[in-house]
Image (cartoon, helix red, strand yellow):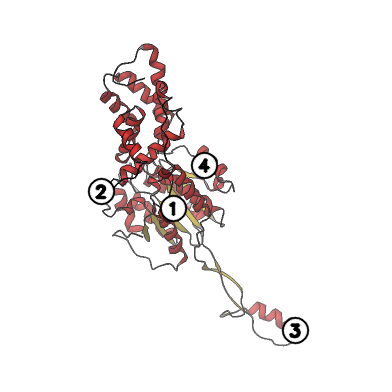
């Protein structure tokens, strides 16, 4: 089709539907949570609203495919590129040429353009409108290049597919050195402070005369690690990277228990124990039914406290909760459940990608309910923040305190 500004004839109805499907694939490749259900909704919406003008067509698809403010730029760029806006294409071509830096910061828009460009290039023309599929746009490899230092500080949300692949390879080699803590069990230790009377008496009976006393000390062991990861729509880009992180630590140590939650709580520990990360994530995808949906933090925490806490929080477990704190139920039930969880574990660490913003303030009811009951509040939005988390867990546990004020990592 040449342009959506003219209503297509009836024999082009299937072609329009197919092009909408291809457009949805581009959006999904660029990072938007677009599934088959939304594709069908988009086709039905266009049929119901008609295609009277390009603007009507834009807002019809916008209403179906865009759920959050941060998705708007991606949708806007993808729409104008896919449905052939020459001005946007011209700007993309300029990205391939040396530019003089100006004072205005357009790094955010360039990151969005790069993700859309890569999503379109990935299809090699198959996902473009059928009558224009022969027109190809080649994107320079510089668009997806990133040095290691740049990659460490790059936000997961802004990464291209190649950079995501590099980040996943780095995450697969990460280790989480949680500091060992003393347990109630004792083991023989010649330098221990406690006298082991049984061992001393057995040694004396064997030798027939008195001998040196035997000593023992407390055993040291890494505490269990429990991960609660938010997989709602607002966390979709980050949660997929965190799954690779959780797979790496699950296969590196024992007693790691992993849960994901959106509108319900799902235990994925058994799936992540597969050595092959692709098999593990495929099994997770099959077992989790609430990807990129809403968030019911209070309901999911209640489920965890009622059905899982006694099984996995023994021996002073450390809990990592990965969530932006945005709750569909406006914070209902969160305060009581997070307080119970906090009292049941050794250390509760909240990892929130929103903390990366300098102007972040705990305004939502969910965040306000969570903050008083966490021991550490840290950002987790790039590789550097994951490295900082590993260093923090390798140090002695700080004294517990209530975090009524946010603290950046």
Task: Please state if 200 lies on the left or on the right of 42 as rendered.
Answer: right
Which image quadrant for residue 160? Answer: top left
Q: What element does badge 3 sit on?
A: helix
Q: Quadrant of the N terminus?
A: top left
Which image quadrant for residue 111? Answer: top left
Give x and y (percent) for residue 387.
44, 59
Q: Is residue 361 placed above or below 217 in the rendered structure?
A: above
Q: What element does badge 4 sit on?
A: helix
N-terminal of the pair, mark 1 or mark 3, is: 1
Which image quadrant for residue 79? Answer: top left
Mark 4 Cα-neighbour bin, 10 Å: few <14, some 14–19, many ≥20? many
Q: Could you give the CA–CA distance between mark 2 and mark 1, rounded to whole angstroms?
A: 23 Å
The one nearer the camera, 71 or 288, is: 71
Q: Which residue is mark 2?
A: 102
N-terminal of the pair, mark 2 or mark 3, is: 2
Cβ–Cβ below 8 Å for labels 1 and 3? no
N-terminal of the pair, mark 2 or mark 1, is: 2
Task: Please state if 38 lies on the left or on the right of 276 as rendered.
Answer: left
Cβ–Cβ below 8 Å for labels 2 and 1? no
Give x and y (percent) for residue 196.
62, 78
The mark found on residue 147 in the picture is: 1
Mark 3 Cα-neighbour bin, 10 Å: few <14, some 14–19, many ≥20? few
Q: Is residue 34 visible?
A: no
Q: What element does badge 1 sit on?
A: loop
The mark found on residue 284 in the picture is: 4
Closest to the camera, between mark 2 and mark 3, is 2
């Amino acid at each position: 089709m040449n342009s959506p500004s003219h209503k297509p004839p009836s024999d082009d109805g299937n072609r329009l539907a197919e092009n909408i499907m291809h457009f949805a694939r581009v959006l999904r490749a660029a990072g938007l949570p677009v599934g088959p259900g939304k594709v069908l909704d988009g086709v039905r919406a266009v049929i119901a609203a008609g295609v009277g003008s390009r603007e009507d067509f834009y807002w019809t698809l916008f209403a179906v495919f865009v759920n959050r403010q941060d998705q708007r730029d991606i949708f806007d760029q993808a729409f104008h590129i896919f449905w052939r806006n020459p001005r946007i294409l011209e700007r993309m071509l300029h990205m391939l040429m040396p530019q003089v830096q100006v004072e205005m910061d357009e790094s955010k828009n360039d990151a969005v353009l790069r993700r859309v460009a890569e999503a379109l290039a990935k299809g090699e023309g198959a996902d473009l409108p059928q009558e224009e599929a022969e027109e190809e746009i080649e994107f320079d490899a510089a668009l997806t290049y990133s040095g290691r230092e740049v990659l460490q500080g790059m936000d997961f949300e802004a990464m291209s597919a190649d950079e995501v692949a590099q980040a996943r390879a780095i995450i697969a080699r990460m280790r989480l050195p949680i500091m060992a803590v003393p347990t109630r069990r004792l083991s023989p230790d010649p330098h221990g402070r406690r006298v082991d009377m049984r061992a001393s008496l057995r040694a004396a009976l064997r030798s027939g005369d008195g001998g040196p006393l035997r000593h023992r000390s407390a055993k040291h062991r890494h505490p269990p690690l429990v991960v609660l990861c938010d997989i709602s729509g607002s966390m979709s880009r980050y949660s997929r990277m965190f799954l690779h992180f959780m797979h790496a630590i699950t296969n590196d140590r024992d007693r790691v228990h992993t849960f994901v939650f959106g509108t319900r709580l799902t235990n994925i520990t058994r799936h992540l124990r597969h050595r092959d990360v692709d098999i593990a994530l495929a099994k997770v995808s099959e077992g989790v039914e609430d990807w990129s949906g809403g968030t019911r933090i209070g309901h999911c925490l209640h489920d965890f406290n009622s059905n899982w806490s006694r099984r996995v929080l023994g021996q002073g477990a450390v809990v990592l909760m990965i969530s932006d704190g945005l709750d569909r139920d406006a914070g209902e039930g969160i305060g009581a459940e997070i307080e119970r969880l906090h009292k049941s574990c050794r250390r509760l660490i909240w990892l929130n990608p929103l903390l990366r913003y300098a102007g972040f303030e705990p305004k939502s009811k969910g965040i306000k309910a969570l903050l008083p009951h966490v021991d550490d509040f840290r950002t987790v939005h790039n590789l550097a923040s994951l490295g900082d988390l590993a260093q923090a867990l390798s140090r002695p546990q700080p004294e517990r305190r209530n975090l009524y004020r946010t603290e950046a990592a």
